[in-house]
Amino acid sequence: MAVELDVFVGNTTIMDEEVYQLWLDGYTVNDAVKVRMEGGVMDECEASADVLQSDTMDQYRTFQMCERLLHSPAKLANQLLFQIPPHRQAMLIERYYAFDDAFVREVLGKKLSKGTKKDLDDIGAKTGVTLKSCRRQFDNFKRVFKVVEELKGPLVENIRHHFLLSDKLARDYAAIVFFANNRFETGKRKLQYLTFQDFAFCAGQLINSWTVGALDNQVEDMDVDLDKEFLQELKELKILISDKDLLDQHKSLVCTALRGKTKAFNEMEANFKNLSRGLVNIAAKLTNTKDVRDFFIDLVEKFIEPCRSDRWTAGDMRLYLTHYTNSAHILDTFKHQVVWDRYMGVIKSCIFKMYHD
Amino acid sequence: MPGKLKAKIVAGRHLPVMDRASDLTDAFVEVKFGNTTFKTDVCPKSLNPQWNSEWFKFEVDDEDLQDEPLQITVLDHDTYSANDAIGKVYIDIDPLLYSEAASVISGWFPIYDTIHGIRGEINILVKVELFNDLNRFRQSSCGVKFFCTTAIPRCYRAAMVHGFVEELVVNEDPEYQWIDRIRTPRASNEARQRLISLMSGELQRKIGLKVLEMGGNAVVGYLQCFDLEGESGLVVRAIGTACTLDKLSSGSAPNTNTHIHPNTAPASNACNSPSKDGKESPLAHGCRSTHNSPVHSACSSQRLSQNFSVSVPTLIFTGMGSGGSAGKEAGPLKTLLRQQTQTALEQREFPFFTLTSFPAGFLVHVGGVVSARSVKLLDRIHNPALGNTRSYKLLDWNSVTADEPETRDAWWEEIRQEIKSHAKALGCHAVVGYSESTSICEEVCILSASGTAAILNPRYMREGCLDIGSTDHRFEEPSPPSCGFCHIPYDEFNMPFPAQLTYCYHCRRQKVPDVLFTTIDLPPEASVTGKGCLIQARLCRLKKKAQGEVNATAISNLLPFMEYELHTQLMNKLKLRSMNALFCLHIQISVGENMLLGLASATGVYLTALPAPGGIQIAGKTPGDLSNEHHILTIQKRINDTIAKNKELYQINPPELTEETVGSPIPEPRQRHRLLRSHSESSDELSELDLSHGKKDAFVLEIDDTDALEDIHSLLTDASPPTGFYSCNTEIMPGIFNWTSGVQMFTSVRVLRLSNANLTNQGLNKTFTDLCENLLKSFYFKLRSMIPCCLCHLKFTVAVPEEELIQVTVTAVAMTFDKDQSQEKLTEKPTTKGSTETEEQLQFPLELSTDLSTNMQTSNKISGTVSLLTPAAKLYQNQLIMVHSAGVPESTTVSPRAASVDYGSFADRCSTWLELLKMKAHTIRRGSVKTSRRTQSLAHPVSSLDRSSPLPEGRSRSLRSNRSFGGSSVPVVKMTPVSFLPGTRIIKYLGIINMFFIRETTSLREEGGISGFLHSFIAEVFAMVRAHVAALGGNAVVSYSMKECVLMENPNKNQAQCLINVSGDAVICVRETDQEPPSVANIGQTCCSSADGAT
């Protein structure tokens, strides 16, 4: 007595959010049935294991049929095959494009290529995410990347519009696309303590202030590529460390402002020149693609680590960077105020975000 | 040239990639109607082409307009090779042919390919300009409206019900034409789809002609079916009920009270109706039946009528055991001939009605279920050697088509005659809830027809249209609507079958049977105790594989046993649930190569008017055996417990009545009967049936072998639905009144492969029962988010697609209701009933006081709800106002009609002077008591409440209700097998949806196996139905049904094919609350009127 065929089709497509999540997480039908049984859903309606199996199969089939549509979510709204209420559609899309932070942390900044895709089983094993789920997430990244690559206009807007995602998720995808495009190094051991959300925040800062789109919002790739002119101009900031007078003047201004306000004052005073050199050098080198990739590792090595070893608190950091930025405005011989602000604005908020254990 | 069809191709979207090199498509469209084809320009390199074509105009006969579909083909242009077809859209333009319905078809249609399924969508505009046709010899019947709904459609009023219309057309199945060997599967499928579309169009046109001849303007309860007879052809047949419908003006009509009051359709109206051709009956088929001597290709036929209140069905074996030889057939043939001559003289029509629910007052009495089955051998083209009458069919099918429908017609004619005579035997002149079906396996075909014998109120019919003797005038006398239909229509002392009669528990005036079986919906005015439930009897019978006549004989020998067993099962299950009536009984017997499947579904209820069912008692065969005795005791206990549990579950707590208070003038101890287990093998069944009519204390089941034990076990294994769920196969659940707007229609298909090792009847029965039970369990689980809800209109269809395969297809709708209010009702209901009941314990109840007390009760109930001030209560009151105003003039019309009753004519039917006396007294009272009528009309608002839940949307609305979501570009179309959508009002019927699709695949595995294949196909069918409805401007399909789902697979070849036929009525409905919000003024009025009612 084998069930040869078993289908259930509703005029309004029936979808159980719990089963959807299990499907997204890459569970097989049998595993999903086990999880559901343990979840106690059977007691709800005097269901048996057979009923659960049949229901799970049905739902999995429905999801598989929907998957094609989810690849271009706009189609989901005007396709005729499934009658799904809009709020359910939104749920389907949002969940389909949701990703595991652990997984994305691994591929962040990597090239979204076939090579990376081959390594997914390793990543899966490392992060505890099933291979099926890894593939879906990776393909999502790639799909979004491909679509927005060719579009004009603001990155986040484009993603939100094309994939009908929530603002939060659209921003995360923007970060992923931005990292993948600029191939920022995130995998080094020293960067391991940083979460995806840290990077996503930094990406947002960079997109808002350092890209071409920050000035002109009708250029292609405006939010993906860094503003080349700006990077050139950053070289001018070198004067802050190459001009001895300027460096000393800057130091004394900062120290005056800080004196008595923090316990770490002595360390700040002692390290000022080193730290300032670090930050300005990062700025000056950003014209090289290689150094752009190392942007985050440089920030950590040249600035965050020294501060951390001197036991600065987050408050110290905030105080120091605020005065460090503002004092530069008082220097009469320093003429690059605009570039300085554009640079330091991002650096400040990135370091604030990244300065934790 | 009576019509101009115009079509415009606007755009396409989501087209598939047809050119791998560019990942794009160069699409263009061919628009074809009849033999005329137009093409659009090619829209190069686009998956979302904008053609924006000119208007393509077709000048055609309206006959063609009715028959032909508009055929739209989307193709990919290819410079070097042949153009590739992307897919097709067939548009039935019939809805554009009558003025009130849709005026334009406009919208996105899925582009469908029989091999690939849906491939993108196309936006089309279609219009029709009809010129008036005054040609009286016309062949078209434009303007006749068709409804699948088996009730008078809401927003219409039946001016007259003309009666039965039927037609069938036959053609050769393209799948079996020689050309099929050389054409592609796609071409073959498309030929088939097109042919069936043409045939349905033709059929509808022909039926329409008959309706026009009868003077009607609509067909209600239109049921169209396909018989895929394989090599012997393709039959498309349809039955329906011709009516003259008047549209209710939306403003004035009591919209929630959808049932037409008797006073809104007075007899005078019938005379004013457009039909002038009074007595002549130009029915084509009537004439045909006379000269159509029974060309019997049947090898044997047997029929059976099931009557209510039977401990055993009355078996009328007209053709039993007449294994196909001409000699044996002579007997039944003669009777048939005699019958036919009689009918030719006195009768021109079958008094059949495909309706299952009726305007109030239409149904006077219900007799019981009548059914007939007949086993036929289909003609085989390649087997002319058989040499007897049935092989007359020639190889050239063109010459045959003229004769072919005659044969099929004769078959059905025969069955209908049978049904009619059964109805007569039950003292009824009409059959309602009538339906026909077939089951075909190879060359054997079982034709089945069933209905409910009934006596109707002749006011609705043209004079002479029905075979109503003058004696029937007594039925015009109004009997209480809540129980009148239960009263026996036949002569008490000349009963057609053994039954126990008691005086009606509701009115105490007339006799009722102890059990009532019907194929109709529960009349809304019927008074029911507690809730109903789905009751199913399931049965498998193995049979030997055989060919031709041997096979047919074997099947026809098995049929009566199956019917008997199914009936016994139903009876037992009914008693186990402590109920006494079945509604919507549908018995399907399906034939396979090595087995027969029987599935009977019905909704059991406890009718207050009928006596309480006795218990079930178990008796052992060998009383001496101690261990056996103990065993029997345990089983008995389990049965008693189950009955008690069910009583609680279905809230069946009828007012206790002692024998003394029954007050029956004929002292008659309440008879109960016992039923012996029938051994399927026993041949002396008829004698056994006689024996069974004893006077035992309870329904007795004798355990004499393991067989019976198994049966009892299976009786007890039927699980009741989990908390929060109810199920029924009627339109709505008796006893639930407050439907909310959550609706989820679904179709589920399951196929079971039997392991071929030692199949036994018992094992099969268990497997089959489990299959059905598990399906139900699955539904409950899947729909658990809708709790509290009820699965309504559950329709199970069984088939044996191959040896060792059992296929069950279910379509139903889950509807949510408001739990709190139903409980509120429940606590009230029994008390109301109870006190009414005590009033009626007087031997001759004073009607005035009874009515008054009911009125008091009702108004008490109202004031109770007013304090709650729920929106539902407000609306409830609204209805009361309307009814009250309607009720008052009504009471004045009662007396003259009652006075016109001809006493003499029915005197002969009154068997005793006592009864005559009683009736006289009764009639006299009628004339003088005014308030009596009022209670009658009071019953209507309550009943209409449950039909059309006046609860405003938004109140405990389910998540799934999907209206009012902005932003989506696809309009939401609701579908339901029921004739209405709760919480809404149908404002327009846009036309019938009748679609036939074939889907085939040669990559079964890649599509997710057979389940994946069927899953997407069903989803596609839904999508296409929705798209067509939306294009007509509708937002819902009511009375939806999937009439055919034929699935064939060949996993070894990685192939599968499926045919699906669906139908329904496209409608526009609006929220009930949209136009009539309960206003404060209304409430004030209600208080007055309810106070008025109490006086």
Image: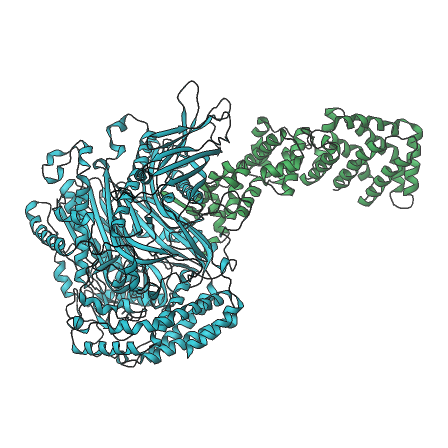
Chain colours: A green, B cyan
Residue B635 lies, in percent from the top left, at 29, 64
Question: Residue shown at 16%/50% (left/top)?
Answer: B414
Residue toward you, B674 or B1020: B1020
Q: Give the vertical position of B318 relative to B261 (above or below).
A: above
User: B260 and B975: which one is in front?
Assistant: B260
| Residue at x 16%, y 78% (from the top left corner) | B913
Relative to B531, does residue B163 appear above or below in the rendering?
above
- Locate the N terminus of chain B by quadrant: top left
Q: Which percent across, then down, holds residue B765?
A: 27, 52
Q: Residue furthest top?
A: B80
Give the position of the C terminus of chain B as an image quadrant.
Answer: bottom left
Q: Residue furthest left?
A: B327
Residue A210 appears in view: yes
Q: Where residue B6 sits: x, y (%)?
A: 41, 36
In the image, residue B570 above or below residue B299: below
On screen, residue A223 above or below A21: above
Res B597 visible: no
Q: How many marks?
A: 0
Residue nearer the viewer, B599 or B260: B260
Left or right position of B1086 against B520: right
Q: x%, y% of residue B497?
A: 17, 64
Quarter location, residue B431: bottom left
The answer to whether residue A314 is left or right of residue B503 is: right
The front one of B492 and A156 is: B492
